[in-house]
Amino acid sequence: MKKKKLYGVASALLASSIALAGCSFGAGSDSGSDEGSGDQVTVDIFQFKVEFKDQFEALTKKYEEENPNVNINVKTVGGGNDYGSSLKTSFSSGEEPDIFNIGGPSDVETYEKYLADMSDTEAAKAALEGTLTSVNKNDETLGLPFNQEGYGILYNKKIFEEAGINPDDIKTHEDLVKATEKLDSKKEDLGIQAPFALPAKETWVIGNHLANTFLADEFNHDVMEAYQADTVEFAMGDQMKRFLDLQNEYSVQPTLSLDYSQQVEELFSLGEVAMIQQGNWVYNTILQMDEEMAKNNVGLLPIPVEGYEGSIPVGVPMYWAVNKQSEDEVVKESKEFLDWMYTSEEGKKFVTEEFKFIPAYEGYEDQKIADPISKEIYEYAAAGDTLGWVFLGAPTNWTEGSLAVNMQQYLSGDITWEQVEENARKDWENSRQ
Amino acid sequence: MQNRSPAFWLFLTPVILALGIVVVIPFLYGLVYSFTDWNGLAATEFIGFEHYINLFQEKEFMNSIWFTLKFAVASVLLLNFFGLALALIVTRNIKTNNLLRTVFFMPNLIGGLILGFIWQFIFVSVFGDIGELLGVESMQGWLSTTETGFWGLVILTSWQMAGYIMIIYIAYLENIPKELIEAAKIDGASSFQRFKNITFPLVAPAFTISMFLTLSTSFKIYDQNLSLTNGGPYNSTQMVAMEIVRTAFSDNQMSYAQAKAVIFFLIVAVVALTQVYYNKKREVEM
C-alpha cells in the first residue's frame, strides 16, 4: 500500500515537471530543429497588433517558404498596456524576443541597450520623412515604423446628405457647431439619437487623441520636443475645452459610461449618431457591422484647429525593433525579414491589401489602399496637411492617467477647466523633475 | 516537530517546494525590490523607505484604499446576509431544493471578467432602457457616477459570491442536531427564538469562515473591477489591486507599486487575522 502511494506521488511529480517544461516559450521544439541542420536561424517575434495577427502569420509563412533556413515564431499580445507589461516580463525573465515593438521615446529609453541600429536597412531609407524622429538617437535609427494612422471626425455621409449639410463647408469650429446644431434640430427626422457619440470612458480617446490635436502646435508637431519639455502650457486649451464641450453636449448621454464599442459598433455603425471622433482603425469593425456603410458611407473631417484648418493628425503608433543582444546571425535575419516585409513587391502587397496599413514608406505609389478612410488619410499625409502625434512624447501615462482623468472629472462637473489644466500641468512637471 | 518521521518530510517536500517557489520567494524578492528603484528590468539604487513615505502622501492610493474599505464593509454584510438567507431557504423542505441550490451557486462558476461585462450591459443598457420607459431618473446613467459605480460593484460581487457562501452555511445548518430544535419546539420556542438561540450560535464557525473568505476576496477584487467600471469615472471606483497594477504597468513605477503591494498585504493580513481572532472567540463548543 505504502509503495503504491509513493509511485503515485512520483508519477504526479513527473507529470507536473513535464507540464512545466512545456511552458517555456516553445524552446523545446526550437532547439530540436536547430540541432537538425546547422544553419537554421530562428527568429522570435513578439508583437502587439492583434488585429492583423492572422495576416501577419500568413506573411511569415510565406517568408519561411522563400527562405527555408529561417524559422519565424510569432507571439501576439494585444492592447497597449498589456503588451508593455508582457514585453517587460519576457525581458526580465530572460526570454528575450528577437523582434519586438516599441512605442515612443520613452520606450526607446527603457530598452535602449537592446535596440539594434536599423539605419543600414532598406526600409529605414524608404521611411517617409518625419516618421523616424522618435526613434532616432545619436545618429542611430533604433526602429522601423509599423504604419501610419490618422484620425479626425468620421461622419455618416448619408445622414449629412439627408440633413442637407455639405461636409466641404465645415472648416472652422463655428462651421462645425452650426452643422451639429442643424443635425440636433433634425434628429427625429434623421432617426439619430444625437449628432455625436463621445466615449469619455475611454481615456485614450480624450486624453491621447482629442488632446493631441490641440497640443501638437505647442510642441511644433515634434514628439521629441514634447518628450524633452519640462511643462505643458495648454496654449490651445480654450479650443480643446470647446471641442470637448461640443462633443459632450451633443453626445448620447451619459458620456462617462459610454465606451469605444458602443460608440463605434452600436451607435455609429448602425446610424444612430452622425459623427464620431475616431481614426482609420475602426474600418474593420464597421465593415463587420455594415459592409455597405464601411465602403461608401464614411467620410473624414478634420478636427477644426485654428491655424490648421484642413489638417489631420497623422502619426506612427508603433515601431519594430530588433534585439541587438541576440546572436549576430539572428539580428541579420531579423533585419532582412523586416526589409522584405516593407520593401519587396510581395511584402508591399501584403502591407496594403492584407494588413490594410497606411504605409509609412516610399515606393507605395502603385499600390492601392484598401479602405476609404485610410485612403483619405494617406491623401492628407501625402499633401502634407498633417498635425504631429505628440502624445507619445508626454510623460509616461500622463495622457491617460492624468489629463484624461481630469477631463472626466471636468465632464462630471466636479472641477472647472482651469483646474484640469492646472492639475495636468502639475503632473507633467512632477514627472519631468 | 522533531519526532516526525522522514516520510513526513518527504511527502511534504513537493508542497513546500511549490509554495516556496511561487509564493514565498517572489514575496521576499518583492519586499527587497520595494526598497530599490527597480523599473522592471534593472535596480540600480537602494533607496530605503522613500516609496513607503511617498505612498502615504499620494491621494490616488489613499482614495483607492478608502474606496476598497467601504466596498469591503458593504459587500461583507450583504454577502453574509444573502448567503445565510439563501441557505435557510434551501435547507427547508421545499421540493425544488436541489434545483435552487444549483441555480444559486451557478453565478460563482462564471468568471469575474465575463460577469463584469454582462453586468455592465445590464447596468448601462438594460437599466437605462427600463429607466427611460418608466421615467425613473435614478435607473439611468449607471456606472457614470461614483455612487452607481460603487453599488454596481457591490451588487455584482454579492450576486456572484452569495451562492458560494450559501454552500458553507448549508454545511453547518445541516449539521445542527435535530434533537436540539425539537427540544426547543417542545419547550415552546417560536421559530424566531429557535433561530436566534439555537441555529445562529451553532453556525458561528460558518461565520468565521465566510467572513474570512468574503473579507479577503472583497479586498483583493480585480477582474470584476476591471471589466465593470475599469476604475471610471475618473479613477474614483478604482480598488487597491487595480491601483497597484496601474502604478506598475501604466505608470511604469515597478518598485513603487511593489511598496504599495506590501502595504496592501499588511492591511489585508491585519484585518483578516483580527476578524478570525474575534470570531473564533465567539464560537460555541457543542
Image: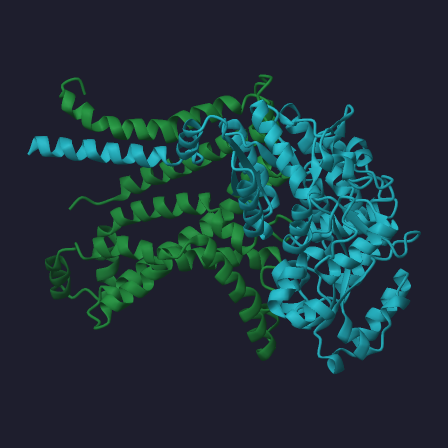
Chain colours: A cyan, B green
- Whether A428 is drawn above or below A345: the answer is above
Q: Total of numbered circles in the picture?
A: 0
Q: Is residue A411 visible?
A: yes
Please indicate whether residue B262 sits to the left or right of residue A32 in the image: right
Residue B269 found in image quarter:
top left
> In x, y percent, where is residue A353?
66, 55
- Seen from the viewer's position, the closer of residues A353 and A158 is A353
Q: Is residue B251 visible?
A: no
> In x, y percent, where is residue A278?
72, 58
Quadrant containing the N terminus of chain A is top left
Which residue reaches farthest left? A1
Q: Residue at x 71, y 61 (%)?
A: A371
- Whether A385 is drawn above or below A180: the answer is above
Please indicate whether residue A197 sits to the left or right of residue B216 in the image: right
Please indicate whether residue A51 sits to the left or right of residue B183 in the image: right
Q: Residue at x 52, y 23 (%)?
A: B33
Q: Residue at x 84, y 51 (%)?
A: A382
Quadrant containing the C terminus of chain A is top right
Q: Residue at x 74, y 29 (%)?
A: A119
- Whether B39 is drawn above or below B162: the answer is above
> In x, y percent, where is residue B45?
60, 17
- Seen from the viewer's position, the closer of residues B286 and A80 is A80
Please indicate whether residue A398 sits to the left or right of residue B210 in the image: right
> In x, y percent, where is residue A95?
49, 29
- Seen from the viewer's position, the closer of residues A161 and B124 is A161
